[in-house]
Structure formats: structure tokens, C-alpha cells
Image: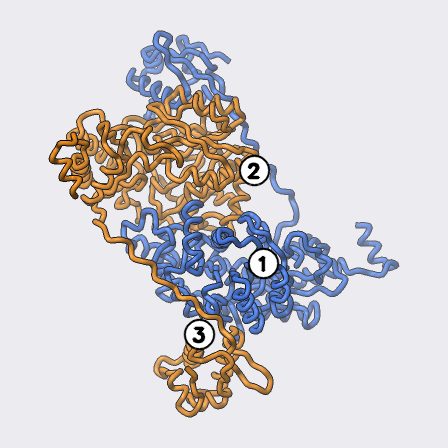
Chain colours: A blue, B orange
């Protein structure tokens, strides 16, 4: 549609609201919109500034400013003798609205792994700490931070790691990151720089670590986990010079790496000139005794320890740290510098204050009791529904493994639970890519960090119901027939 | 040294402070330390729990707990019939203290590029916003966020981008990141996934972008910048299908991409099925008129716009965004998911509140006046010291380019300024790797965001002095002789 720039024409295009003022901005916005929408076509000549000023009843200077702005932005062009014309504009792309997710029964009870109790996040303390940080952080530290991260936080975190996790590291061994995954990505890149080509991963183990390792240029090889944790004998056979593991509370089986295995692992690292990456997650939550110390304390020259507050405070406070032998620290910092510059300086100071003032410890004590109570309810409820001895990995952390009776179909139980409003993942969800799910017993991973005691009771009953819905039955069973017909 | 576990022996090792309590923890810490330090050697047999309890005057249960803990941590081992023995421990690595930086004259005046006025960071507003966020953010959003980032922030940021930057993007086109570099890293990875192999970079241009491009698997090719910004004719010759540029205020020359160039660039992108990555930094600070609109608004299907608050608020609030055509959004989100999970949810909500309530705009208005005053002082001072017409790129932003008289040695002036306590970088600091510095005129990049008016006056005088110190003189000049002797 061609707009006729004759008397009255521009009204169609530019409707000025004289009450709100900013007439220049109004004209400009509307001309821009008109050009984008093709209401003003390419090559079309705009009225002179004098004409438009008269037509709209504004000062000529206002229109001159508008034209100059549009000229600078490329919407119009100006040639001596031919006035101002609409420039050739590309066709704007549509922004399709993403399709809505398929409707299914909403999740009412969520046994998703790895979410802490979100209702207990110490928000008042956090708000206090940020406020303190804005008040006390030296102005210069509001700029680009020291690349390794806030020295204050590195001192506090390593002191915490020495005190609570029996670690051996100082501020110069620490790099602040924005959570576990970022720390892992940096650490793996540093390994690759040191010529390490293959890394062993626990199988089953945390999700995506195989993908993350491959992205760093490493070959990921799975190593089996048994009741003592990672099988170090098999680790030796892989020829890998690095291993990534969750020794305090294996994800997802819940076992702690046994004392003999810990020593074997340290010996392996020395023998192969290797590196252990310790995912020190949820070690703080051990119920029957103190947490098992960090592997890092056993062999600081060969262990890179990764920690974060995603499970101790909340994922929404995205801070973590890498404690690494000196030979890797430079590479980790360089990765950080080039890929993100790291975590917010104010939040780092806030976390340092939270830990230093004892608020962090107090919070841990408080939630530990909450998790202990949930664990007890979970254990009792599972025993009622599935009999004794089916629940494993309860000594620490916020998840446990429920062994399903032999012959159960893990995916079928997961799907049936979903129809009852319960989200839960099977053990198969945690297998390294390429593993044969049939080689593992059917089991469910029950995260109970963010599930109330009442929800645990209802959820376990629903899972038991889901399980009976899919019990394998003899071929002649009418029940089986019904299921097939569904 | 072998500790004799005879009467009195353990006192040497375990000194209990009965006032502070926690006797078990004290014993444990000291045994751990002794094992690490080799004061207790591998294979050495520990006293029985009964013996040690008697020796130390604590309950036997306390010692049992200590031994079990050390056993679990791998410090000791226990074999039926032979009691508890110290396990074989690896030699701990020393953690060398990094060498102190060489002492040189401290920086008194810092013309470093890209630092905003740190004294003006709206800390009270930020503290308010975080507090509001802790009060109002739904509990569920304290968990792992939606991968694209807070929907609230994406809505607010795209609305801001439409309003202030003439952009065309909605929340579904936005991904929240932890600053510009992270956004760039993700965007480049998404380009690589789409088969783009070569990216053109402005030369001179922002530091490290060549390295970052190569890390993403792209070949980086430099393209010259002139008084109209990036030379699009030369861009065409490179055969690149992507370009990264700073159109609003070129870094470091300070020129704005001319209107004709903007259109040529858009046409180039359409012709080669290409992508423009727009580094939309410091566009908010234009002094003589409104900011030039974002390229993204001209061709949303071909422009990825990167923004952050590092220059508008502070680097210590590490938040940014990527606005991308839909075909790249999924790849960018996947990069984010695997490499870091992104930015803190509470901070994202805080920033949304800061922008939504007008506090962000108010802050920009306030600092714009500060920067305008500094700019005026800088212009006057440089004219006084170097004559008219030497300072370029002052129309916007917080840095300008000072052309040094022909024949000046840029590195020599930079070094001489440093001896006077002034940090400033030469243009050569911003050349793409492999460029010939001789091909560029000698010039200094003057960042004035975080330098007071008083410091600007002193700093420019010092630079002028540094320049005269290194003026090229005829060989017979006594002055030259003196300089050589220094």
C-alpha cells in the first residue's frame, strides 16, 4: 500500500498523542513501524521536513531530528537533490510461537533427582548477605573481577572445605565458577590441555557427563559401580588417565565409595599419572555420622574437587568452585576468561559472608533434619509397599534407589506413575550412552529433597500402584489381557 | 618419626582442648593431620579404642566414632585380628605460593577500556531488587530454571530492546546468559552447528574475539574498519558467512556504522545466507541524540544481538542476553544447558524488577550525564594538549580514540605513561592476531567511564608528557641522547 504524502495523508500514519508529549519520539516510532510493515515502501519519498512539520503541527527541528535518527539507523536514505527516501528493507522474519507442550497429567509429586528443599532456601539470609555485600564490597571490586574469582570467597570456601570436607586446599588452588557444570567443563578442558584423552565415568552415573566429556574432546568410557562404588579394577582396565566420580554418595545408586576403594583409587591415580575429578555433591547430608571426607584431602596433587551451592542452598544461587592442583589452575582460569568471565562479584561476596557468619552452617543443620525426617518416612513407606531391603543408598544425600522386583519393567512403571501424577526416573535414565539397559536391574531413583513427607507417602503408594498395574502376569491371566487391551 | 603409642605418647599427637568441647572432632582432626604429615606412618598400628579412650580420658564411643570416620575416609584400615592401622597414603603435593607480581609504579589513573563508573553503580537499587526477588519469586523458580532463563527477564529485556534499541524480538527469541562472553560463546557454537565455518571480525576490534571464535571451531578473518565502520565491500571478499561487529560505537575506534553501511551489511547477509552478530554494547550512551537503533530490528532473521549489563550497571552483576532468530535458539539453549546452566535465578528476577520499575532507566539517565561531562572534559583537555581534531569516536559510549602525531611510537608512549602512573592501551592492543601494527596509525584508546574529571585532566597531561618524552627527534638532538641514556 502506497501512502500518499499529500495533505491529510500522514494522519493515517502518524497519530500524535499531544498529551503524553515526546512528539519526536512518537513520529519516529510510527515511521519506523510503517517502514518495517511495508506501509511505506522502499524508495518512497518522504515529505520534506518543512512539509511534515506543517502537516503534524510540530516544529521543523523535531522533524529534522526524526529524519536524522532514521537516517542513522538505516531506515531511510538521503541523496542530494532527491530528498529523503525509504531505504530498501529486508523482509522481516516471522517469529513463530513455539508449540505448546503436549497436554498430559500435571506432575503433582516430583521425585526428580537433585532438587533441594526449595521451601527452605534461606532467602532472608541471602537478601541480608547481598545487602551487606553492596554495602561493604570495595568499589573497585564491582569491575571485572580477579579471574580466579573473589579472593574472599575462595578463602572462605577452601576453609570450609578443609573444615567440613577434610580437604587440603587454599585460596590459590580455587577458582570460582557458576555451578558444577561450568566447573566440570573448565576442568575437563584443562585435562585435555594436559594431554589426557580418555576419562572414565561411573555407570550408572550423573546425566550428561558423557556428552560434556566428549565436548571437551575426551573419550568417555563407562566403568561399573557396585555396592562399594566405582570398580577400580575395571577402571584400571580402561587405560583412562582420568576418572569422574561421586564418592560421597554415588549418583544415582547412593552408595559411598568404600574405604579400600578410596585407597585403590588414589593408588591408581599415582600409578597412571592420572587425575580424579571428585563431584563432591550432597556430601554435607550424611545422617548417621559425619560426612566422609573429600578424596581431595587424601591426594591433593591428583584430585580436582568440584563443589557448588545448588544442593546446599538453591540452584537459583548459581555459584560453585573448582579446587585443583596448581598445574591445572592456570588452564581452568583461562577457560573461564575466554568463555564467560564467571560468576557475579556481588553474589560471590554475599556467599562468602553467608558462610563466614555461620548462616550457611545453620542452614545446613536445619535442612539436614528435614531431609532426615523425609528419609525416614520414605524408608518406612517403601518397606510397607515393597517389603524390606528394597531401598538403597539412604546413608546420605537426598535420593535413594528403589530396586523393583525382578522382571518389572522400569519404563512401564515410570510411565504408569506419570499417569498417576508422579514423576520419577528409572535407573536407565542414568546410564552412560551406549549401555545396555537390560544389563541393569530395574530400579527407580527417588529424589526426596523437594518432596514433603505427605507427598512421599502419597507418591510411594502411587508408585506401588503403578508397579502392580504393570506386573508381569502369566499369559493366561485375565489381568494381562486387560492391560494389553488398553 | 614413629610415634610410640605408649603411656603419654598420644599427648604429643592429640592435644585436647576440653573447654571448646567436640572432643571427637579434635581427636579426628589431629589424627588426620598426623597421618597426612607422616607423623603416623603407613602400616603403623593405632591403639585399641579402649586404650586410646583411657589415654585421652574420653568415652570409648567417642574413639570408636573417630576410628570409623577415619576408616570411611581411607586414612586407616582395619583387618580382623590386627586392629586398626594407618593406611598407605600418597605424598601430598606442595601448594607453591604464586610469585608476587613485579613491583612497578601503581596505576593511579586508569584509562582501561570498558569499565563503567563503578562509583555510580546503583547498589541500593540492586539490593532492593534482590530483596524484592527473594520475597516475590515463586518457590518453584528457586530450582533449576527454565533453560532459556527467567521468562520474566526475557520479557522485560526484549521489551526494553524494542523500546530503546528499536529491536524486534520477543521472550521466545531470548536466552539469558551470564554476560557478553558467554552469549558470544553460545552464539558461535550455534553458528558452527549450522555449518558456518568462517567469521569476519572488525580489525581493530574487541580483544580476544579471534581466540573465542577459533575455540568455537570457526576461522576468524579480519576486516578493516574505516570512518564509516566495518568495510562491507571487504567483508564480501572474505567469503565469510558470519560477521561479529560493534555497530553502535565501534570498539575501539568509536565510529558508528554509517547508514549506507548498515544497509549494505543487511544486504550482504541476505546475499550470502549469512548471520550478523551484533555486539550491542554501550549503545545506551549517545550524547547528541538518541542511540542508533539495533541492527537486529532491521533484519531479525539474520541478526543475533548480544547485550549485557556489564557496562550499563556493573561487571559484578553478571547478566546478559542473546536475541536470536528461532533457528539458532535451540542450539544456544543446548550449549547453555551443557556448559553451565546459566545465570542465577534470583539475580535474573532482580534485574527484571530493576528494569520494570524504571530504576534501570533512571540510572542510565544519571550516568549519561556523568559520562557526558567527562567526555567534554576529555575533549577540551586533549585539544589543549594535542591540538584540535585528534580525538575521535566521541559521539557515544565511554571511550574515544586519540590519534598520536605521525611518527609517534604507540608502545613507547604507553610505556612512558605507565611510568607516570597512567594506564592506557594503544590501538595495537586491539588488532586481530597476525595483523601488522605498522599498518595502523599510532593511537591511544581512552576509556573514560571510570575516570573522574579531575583524573582525566591529570591523565591527559601525563600522556602528553609521556608523548614528548618519546618524541622522535633528529639524531643530533641532545634530548634524544638523554632518552637513550635512561
The 10 Å Cα crowd at callout 2, few under 14, some 14 to 19, many 20 or more, is: some
Tag 2 and tag 3 share a subunit: yes
Q: Which residue is at a point 27% across and 28% down the rendered structure image?
A: B392
Image position of A443 (left or right of B316): right
Chain letter for mark 3, please. B
Chain letter for mark 1, please. A
Determine which of the numbered discs, if any, sits on residue B193 in the image: 2
In depth, the one of B39 and A162 nearer the eye is B39
Q: Which residue is mark 3?
A: B36
Residue B203, relative to residue A482: is it above or below? above
Residue B120, relative to residue B79: is it above or below? above
Dot 3 falls on a residue whose secondary structure is helix
Q: In this view of the protein, can residue B54 be seen by the observer?
A: yes
Q: Which residue is at a point 32% across and 30% down the rendered structure image?
A: B438
Tag 1 and tag 2 share a subunit: no
> Can you name the residue that lies furthest to the left here?
B478
Image position of B138 (left or right of A440): left
Q: In this view of the protein, can residue A23 be seen by the observer?
A: no
- The quarter holding residue A321 reads bottom left
The 10 Å Cα crowd at callout 3, few under 14, some 14 to 19, many 20 or more, is: many
In depth, the one of B243 and B149 nearer the eye is B243
The picture places residue A95, in percent across and down from the top left corner, at 54, 31
Tag 1 and tag 3 share a subunit: no
Q: Which residue is mark 1?
A: A240
Dot 2 falls on a residue whose secondary structure is helix
- Are discs 2 and 3 less than 8 Å apart at CB? no
Q: Which residue is at a point 34% across and 47% down the rendered structure image?
A: A144
The picture places residue A344, in percent across and down from the top left corner, at 39, 50
Q: CA distance from mark 2 to mark 3?
A: 49 Å
Amino acid at each position: 500500500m502506497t501512502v500518499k504524502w499529500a495533505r491529510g495523508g500522514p494522519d493515517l500514519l502518524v497519530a500524535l498523542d499531544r498529551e503524553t508529549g515526546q512528539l519526536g519520539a512518537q513520529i519516529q516510532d510510527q515511521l519506523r513501524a510503517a517502514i518495517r510493515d511495508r506501509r511505506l515502501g522502499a524508495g518512497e519519498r518522504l515529505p520534506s521536513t518543512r512539509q511534515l512539520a506543517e502537516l503534524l503541527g510540530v516544529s521543523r527541528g523535531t522533524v529534522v531530528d526524526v529524519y536524522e535518527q532514521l537516517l542513522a539507523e538505516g531506515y531511510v536514505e538521503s541523496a542530494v537533490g532527491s530528498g529523503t527516501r525509504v531505504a530498501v528493507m529486508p523482509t522481516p522474519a516471522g517469529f513463530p510461537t513455539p508449540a505448546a507442550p503436549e497436554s498430559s497429567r500435571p506432575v503433582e509429586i516430583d521425585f526428580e533427582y537433585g532438587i533441594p528443599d526449595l521451601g527452605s532456601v534461606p532467602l532472608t539470609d541471602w537478601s541480608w548477605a547481598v545487602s551487606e555485600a553492596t554495602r561493604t564490597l570495595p568499589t573497585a571490586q564491582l569491575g571485572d573481577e580477579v579471574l580466579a574469582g573473589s579472593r574472599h570467597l575462595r578463602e572462605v570456601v577452601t576453609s570450609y572445605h578443609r573444615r567440613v570436607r577434610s580437604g587440603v586446599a587454599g585460596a590459590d588452588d580455587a577458582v570460582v565458577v557458576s555451578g558444577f557444570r561450568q566447573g566440570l567443563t573448565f576442568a575437563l578442558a584443562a585435562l585435555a590441555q594436559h594431554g589426557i584423552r580418555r576419562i572414565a565415568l561411573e555407570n550408572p552415573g550423573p546425566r550428561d557427563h558423557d556428552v560434556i566429556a566428549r565436548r571437551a574432546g575426551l573419550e568417555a568410557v563407562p566403568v561399573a559401580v557396585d555396592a562399594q562404588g566405582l570398580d577400580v579394577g575395571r577402571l584400571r582396565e580402561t587405560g583412562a588417565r582420568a576418572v569422574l566420580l561421586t564418592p560421597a554418595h554415588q549418583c544415582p545408586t547412593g552408595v559411598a565409595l568404600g574405604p579400600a576403594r578410596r585407597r585403590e583409587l588414589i593408588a591408581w591415580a599415582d600409578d597412571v599419572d592420572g587425575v580424579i575429578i571428585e563431584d563432591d555433591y550432597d556430601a554435607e547430608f550424611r545422617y548417621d555420622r559425619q560426612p566422609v571426607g573429600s578424596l581431595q584431602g587424601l591426594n591433593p596433587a591428583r584430585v580436582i574437587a568440584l563443589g557448588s551451592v545448588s544442593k546446599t542452598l538453591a540452584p537459583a544461587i548459581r555459584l560453585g568452585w573448582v579446587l585443583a592442583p596448581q598445574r591445572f589452575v592456570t588452564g581452568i582460569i583461562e577457560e573461564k576468561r575466554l568463555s564467560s568471565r564467571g560468576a557475579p562479584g556481588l553474589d560471590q561476596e554475599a556467599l562468602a559472608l553467608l558462610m563466614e557468619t555461620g548462616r550457611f552452617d545453620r542452614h545446613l543443620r536445619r535442612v539436614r533434619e528435614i531431609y532426615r525426617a523425609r528419609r525416614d518416612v520414605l524408608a518406612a513407606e517403601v518397606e510397607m509397599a515393597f517389603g524390606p531391603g528394597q531401598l538403597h543408598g539412604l546413608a546420605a544425600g537426598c535420593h535413594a534407589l528403589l530396586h523393583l522386583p525382578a522382571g518389572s519393567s522400569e519404563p512401564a512403571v515410570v510411565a504408569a506413575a506419570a499417569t498417576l501424577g508422579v514423576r520419577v526416573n528409572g535407573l536407565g535414565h542414568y546410564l552412560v550412552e551406549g549401555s545396555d539397559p537390560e544389563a541393569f536391574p530395574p530400579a527407580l531413583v527417588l529424589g526426596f529433597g523437594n518432596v514433603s513427607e505427605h507427598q512421599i507417602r502419597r507418591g510411594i503408594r502411587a508408585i506401588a500402584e503403578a508397579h502392580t498395574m504393570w506386573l508381569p502376569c502369566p499369559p493366561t491371566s485375565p489381568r494381562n489381557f486387560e492391560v494389553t487391551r488398553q
